[in-house]
Image: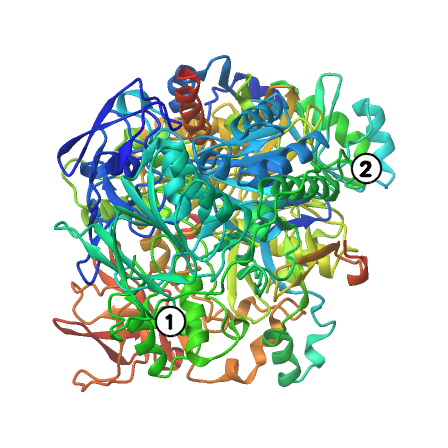
Amino acid sequence: MKRLAGRGRINQDRTISFTWDGRAMSAHPGDTVASVLLANGIRVLGSSVLMNRPRGVVTDTMSDPNAFGQIGTGESSEPLMRLTQVEVYEGLTAMSRIHKGVLPTGTDTGRFEKRHAHCDVLVAGAGPAGLAAALAAAEAGARVLLVDEHPHLGGSLLGEDVVIDDRPAHLWVAEVEQRLRDNPAVTILTRTTVFNVGDQGAIALMQRVSEHLPEAKRRGRALRRMWQVRTHELVVATGATERPLVFPNNDRPGVMLAAGVRGYLHRYGLVPERAVVFTTNDDAYRTVLDLINAGVDVTRVVDVRPDPQGWLPRRARELGVEVRGGSVVMDTTAAADGALAGVVVAPLGGGETELITCDVLAVSGGWDPLFDLHHYLGGTARWDEQLLAFVQDNVVAGQRVTGAAAGIFGTTACRRDGHLIGLVAAEATGFGSATSGPAAPEAADVTEQAPADFVRVAAVDGDESHSFVDHHRDVTMAGIERALNSGITNVEHLKRYTLVGTGTEQGRTAKVNAGRLAADHFDLDFHMIGVSNARPPSQPVTFGSFAGRALGARFDPVRTTAIHSWHVAHGAVFEDVGQWKRPWFFPQGTEDMDAAVLRECAAVREGVGMMDASTLGKIDLRGKDVGVFLDRLYTGTMGTLKVGRARYGVMCKADGMVFDDGVVLRVAEDNFVATTTTGGAAGVLDWMEDFLQTEWPDLDVWLTSVTEQWATVAVVGPQVRTVMSTLAPELDVTQDSFKFMQVEDAVVAGMPARVARISFSGELAFEINVPTTSGLAMWEAVFAAGEPYGITPYGTEAMHVLRAEKGYFIVGQETDGTVTPLDLGLDWMIADKEFVGRRSLRRTDMLREDRKQLVGILPVDPNDRLPEGAQLIETAEYEIPVAMIGHVTSSYESAAMGRTFGLALVRGGRSRIGETIYAPLLDRTVAVELVDPIIFDAEGTRRDG
Amino acid sequence: MLRGLAAMVSRAEPLAALEAKIAATTVDDTRLTTVPFLAQVGLRLDPDGPAAARLAAVLGSDLPGPNRAVAAGAHRVLWLGPDEWLVVAADGQEDSLVASLASAVGEDGGVIDLSSNRTGLELSGAFAREVLATCCTIDFHPRVFGPGQCVQTLIQKAGVLIDQRTDDTYLLLVRPSFAAYVAEWLLDGMLGLQADFSTR
Amino acid sequence: MFQIRCPYCGPRDEPEFKYGGQAHVAYPADPEQLSDEEWTRFLFVRDNSRGRYAERWNHAAGCRRWFNVIRDTGTHEMVGSYRSGERPEDAR
C-alpha cells in the first residue's frame, strides 16, 4: 500500500525508525507495526504455521489472524504480539514470527503492576455506543470507568468517514471526551483491554502503561498494569468484527477485510494501488466510496447479491465503479513473493471467468457482534436471521450489551442505544432515572439493503485444501469437511479436532464461518449448531502480569520476632515455620548443623540454654465461663485450674483427630491464656470463635489473639535458677516457691514480665513473657545474665531433639490429621466429660488394635540415623510389594544418650515394645528396636532441677 | 508498681530495619511514617449491655458502630466487630486507659492491653489513596470512605486495621511481624506512583 | 473472585473470608447417644446440590464473625447473607 500525504491520524511531519527482521523501517508517530509494514511495501509478514503459506495483514484490529510478531530483544522480548496494536517507537525491534514465537528464558526485569479500582458503571469500548453510555451514566452521577484498547477514544469512528451532528465524527469524540475528563467521577483508561469478567462485578483489565514508549522514556514506570475492578454494572460496547469469506486461495497477502482497508486509509493514510471489493452486503461499499474519494482505482465490486440496489451501491455506480451483482471471487493469483496479484471473478453458479489485476482484495462476509465478555459468566447467543449474525440471547445480571456488540449498526443507532443503556446502568446503581434522563439523539441512519446469506465459494475442481477458514491455525475447508465426515457433530469438538478458532486472536474471523459451514454440511439450521464459546482471557496475559509486584519481600509475608535482629547478628541459620523465620541452630565457627545441634542440646541438659519462643500462638480468654468453654474443647479439664497455675492440653476436631496442643495458663479468676502451636495459632482462634459464636453463644467468653502482644524467652537447663536469680532477685525461684506449671507476674531485668515454669525439654525451665517491644531487651538481659554460666542460645532443631528424647509429640510431625490422642498414648489426658471429638474416639475404626500408635525407636546400630519419613516393615529380607506397618516421624542424634533415636507410628506399636522391625532404605535396611516413646529420663527427675 | 516500670525499659521499634528506606521514599507530598509504641487497649462488651453507658461516660462518646472510628478527648475508639473495639492513644497512656476502662466495664466485658499487638504506619499525602489501591481491595473513594471510618482488611496477605484520620491521612495498624511486609508493599506502590508522577 | 457481604462489615473480597462448609449442621447436643452411623453422618455427610445452598463463612480478616451465606452453586450468585442465629429467610 502507499501513504497519502496529509491523510490518517498519524503525524506525518515526524519520522521515526525501527527495525523489522533487522531492516530499518521508516514510520510516523501514531503508526502500528502493521501499518508501517504495509506502508513499506512488506506484504508478506511470514509463513503460516502448518502449510508454510505466505501471509499478510488482514485488517487493522485485534481480530487480525496473521499480524503477529516478536517484539523486543533479550529477556524482555515477547512473542505473539499483535502488530495491529503495537505502536512503533524510536528503536523498537520487531521480528517476523507470525504464528509461533520464542520465549525468553531469563528473568524479565520489567515492572508489572496491579491496581484495584471500584466504579458504578464500567464501560468496555469507547466507540459511539460506549462513549454515549459513559457520558449518560457519568452525567447521571455514577462513577464511571471507561476502557478502550486503542490509544485514542472513538473506536470505529476513527476508521470511518462519518459525520455526527453535521461535523466530522472526531469533533464529537473530542467533545464527549472533554466532558468526561472534566467530570471527577470518571476515569478513562486507554490502551486497556478487558480480559476477564468474574463474579459479582469483578473485572480484570490489562493496561499498556509504558511499553509503547522508547525505553528512555519509560523511566521506571510499569510496562503494564493489571486492574482488578469491582463494578456494579458492566456495559459491553466492544463493537463488531468483520467476517471474511471462504474461497480458494483466500489467504494471499493482500486479501483483506473491507473495513480494515478503509481503516488503514482513515487511521494511517494508506491506500492500495488497485482494489477489488468482494461483498455480501452494503457496508463494504463504504470502503469503495472512501477509496474513490482518496483517488484509488476500485476496479470492480463483486457482489454476491443479484441486484445490489441500496443507496451505497447506487452511489458507487454513480461514481463510475463497475458493480457486478450475482458474482463471486472464485480464486486468486499470486505474484512472485506469494502476495496477491489478481482475482478470478465469475458469476455465482458458474459461467465465464475474468482475471482482474489488483494488489488488494477487500472482502466482507458481514459483521459479527463482539460480545465475548457476555459469554464469560454464562451468557448465551442466538443466530439472528435478519442480521445474519449471532447476538446476545439471555441477560446476565449486572451486564448490558450495547451498540454493534448488540447487533445495532449505524452510528446514530449506536449512540442512541449507548445513551439509553448508560442511563439504565446508572439508574441500576442508584443514579438518575432512565425514563427522565436527557433525550437520546433522534436522527435515524439510512437503511441498507439486506445482506446475502453466503459464506463460501466452492472450488470448481473440488479441491478445498487452499480455501482457508482459519488463517491463524491453517484450517481449510478440506480440514473442516474431513472432521465433519469423520463423525464430529458438535462445534466444540470441531474446534478441538481441527483447532479452528483456537488462535491467539481467539479465532474472531474463523469461528462463525466454521459453525456455519458445519451447519451447511449437515443441512441444519445454524442455531442447531451454534458457535464455540468465547473463554477468558480475551487476550494473552503474561505470567509476569499475574505475579505483579508480589516479588522478593512482597511474595509472602516473612514474619520475624522482636528478637530476630539478634539472631541474625549471632549467625543463626533459620527455619521456615509457616510464615515465621525461626532460628534453626546457631553454628559456632566451622560447625555443621549436626555439631551445632549436639552442642546446643548438651548445653541445655548440662548447663543452661535459651530459646526464642515468641512465635507460639497465644489466645487471651476472658469472661465468667472460660473454664466451661475450655473444658468443652480440650480433652482434659481446664476449669479446675487454679489461678497462677498452668496445664498442658490437647484439642481434637469433631472427628477425634488431634488438632492442636499447648499449655493453658490461668492468670486471673476470669482470665486464661491458651498457647497454641506456631502454625496453628490462627486456625485455633477461628475454630474457638466458631464454637463460641455458633454453638454456645450463651457463654460469657471473649477471645483475643495476643500472639504478637508478647515476646517469650525460654530459659532452660539445670543452671537456670542461678540465671533467674540474677535477673529477678526479688523472685523466689526455689522449688517450693515456684513449682512446675506455676505462673508469676514479676520484675525480670527491670521489666514487668509474666514468668511461667513450663518445660518442653524435660529440664527445669522458665518462660519469660514481656510485651513484644521489650522482647529484644529481655533477650539481651537474659543472655548477659547467663553469659558467666555459658548460656547457649538454641534453635528449633535442638528443641525438637530435646522434646523427642522425652517422647513429646509435635502436631504436624507426629500427627497428620489421622492420629487420635489414644494413638499417641494420651489415654491419661482423656477426662471423664464431654468434649469436641470425644464421640469419635469410640467409632469402630478408632478401636482397631492395629491402628498406628506412637512408639520410640532405637536403631540397633547406635550410629545409624534414619531419615524421617522412612517406612517400617516386619522383616529384614523382603520382596516388593511389601506391607508397610509404620513410618518414622522423628529421628535425631541424642547428645544425652550418645546415640541415634526416633519416634515412629507403628501398627499396634504399643503392644510390640521390645520387638525389632526394619526400615528398608535405598542403600541398606536398618533394624530398629521398638521402645517406649519416653526414652530419656523416664522418671522425670530433671524437671525440678 | 510493675507497670510503672514500663517507661524505663528500652524498647525496639518493629520497623527499625526499614526506617531509612521508609524515610527516603516519597511521591510528591505523600509519605510513610512509622508510629511505634501507641497505647492500644482492646475492649470487649455487649453494646446493648449495661457497660456501654458507663463506658460512654468514661470515653466521652458512644461506642462507634460498624466501620466507624470516633475521636474523643485524647484517644480514638475504633470499631473492630459487633462486640469489639480498640482504643488508641498516645504512648504511655495504656496503664491509665486500662484502669479507667476496666472500672467502667466491670464484669460485663473485657479490657486488655494490646499496645504491643500492633504497630502503626501513617500514610499521608495527596497520593495516599492511590498507594493503597496498589495493594488493598477496599474502596477508599471519598464518596464511600472518609475520615471517621476504619476498616479491618488485608494488604495483600497481611491483616491490617486502617483508620482514616483526615482527607489524605491513613493510620495503618499492623501486627509487628507483618509490618515489614506491609511497608514493603506500600513503598513499592509509592515507587510506581513516583515514576508516574515524575513523568506527568 | 467472589464478593461476599459480611452481615457486620459489608461487602468484601473473598480473600478476607474463610469457608466453613454447609450451614445449619449443629454439633449434636448429646453425641454419646448417637449410633456410629448417626455420628458418622454428622461428621462426614453434607449436601452437594446445584442451586441455592446455605453455607458458612468466617470474616477472618475483618470482624472475625461466623455467618451464613446463600450462594447459588450453579451460577455463583450471592443471594444473601445472614447472621448466626438468623434464619435463611433473613438473608439479604
Report the residue at 79% width, 39% height from top: A433
Name the residue that disc number 1 marks.
Answer: A349
Tell me residue A104's x, y (percent). 20, 44
Label 1 Cα neighbours within 10 Å, binned few <14 / some 14-19 / many ≥20:
few
Label 2 Cα neighbours within 10 Å, binned few <14 / some 14-19 / many ≥20:
few
- If the image is split into quadrants, where does the N terminus of chain A sit? top left
Tell me residue A6's x, y (percent). 36, 23
Name the residue that disc number 2 marks.
Answer: A436
Q: Are marks 2 and 1 on the same chain?
A: yes
Judge whether A707 appears above or below A344 on screen.
above
Question: Residue A222's image quarter?
Answer: top left
Look at label 2 and name its amino acid. Answer: Ser
Report the residue at 41% width, 71% height from top: A517
Question: Residue A637's image quarter?
Answer: bottom right
Report the residue at 24% width, 23% height from top: A16
Judge whether A164 appears above or below A384 on screen.
above
Per the image, label 1 sits on a secondary structure element best described as: loop
Left-right relation of A404 to A364 = right
Look at label 1 and name its amino acid. Answer: Gly
Relative depth, front residue between A749 and B10? B10
Q: Chain of mark 2?
A: A
Residue at mark 2 to residue at mark 1: CA–CA distance: 55 Å
Relative depth, front residue between A478 and A459? A459
Q: Which mark is residue B24?
A: none
